[in-house]
Image (cartoon, rainbow, N blue to C red):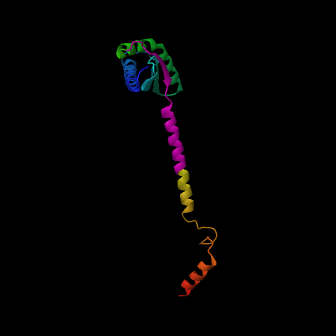
Amino acid sequence: MADQARIRRMSVRVREIVAGVIERQVKDPRLGMVTVTDARLTPDLREATVFYTVWGDESDRTETAAALESAKGVIRSAVGRGTGLKHTPSLAFVHDALPENARHIDELLERAREADEQVHHLAAGARPAGDVDPYRHSALESETDDADAQA
């Protein structure tokens, strides 16, 4: 079992190696505009999950996923050579949904801003319903307020 610092270093190294191999060595025409966003290793350094994003539509994503699965052996060999680990980690490629989730959250925030502006616009000329001072006052306070008003 490796310490957390070594796992982080190896994860960064795996991410860099995978990105470089995809850019330079994998010549599959199905491979789209891929960005490797993250890599995570298990504590025993035997399995690596590589997260990626693809620019394009759903068909580009499925074709890229097939191309990455096809090139997994070449990529894993390069990871083994580049990391110097005793056991080369097995690779799993996972599409990173973070950009889509971020875009969705931005859209929701924009809708909330628009709704807040509408409420603010409606409240600008509004007056309170009921008395100006809706709080109850004791009889003693009323007498002093009356005395202050007469003076």
Residue 71 seen anywhere in this rendered image of the structure: no
Residue 92 seen anywhere in this rendered image of the structure: yes
Res 3 → quadrant: top left
Does 91 appear in magenta? yes
Residue at position x 55%, y 55% in the image: 118
Q: Position of residue 57 (x, y in %)?
A: 51, 28
Residue at position x 54%, y 58% in the image: 120
Asked if residue 87 is positioned above or below residue 56 in the image, the reply reads above
Asked if residue 84 is positioned above or below residue 96 in the image, the reply reads above
Is 49 displayed left or right of 82 in the figure? right
Q: Position of residue 115 (x, y in %)?
A: 56, 52
Q: Position of residue 62 (x, y in %)?
A: 52, 21
Tell which of 65 and 72 is nearer to you.
Answer: 72
Does 35 appear in magenta? no
Q: Which region of the structure is painted magenta?
A: 85-113
Check the picture and name the quadrant holding the N terminus: top left
Q: Position of residue 75 (x, y in %)?
A: 41, 15
Tell which of 118 and 5 is nearer to you.
Answer: 5
Is 130 displayed left or right of 20 in the figure? right
Res 11 → quadrant: top left
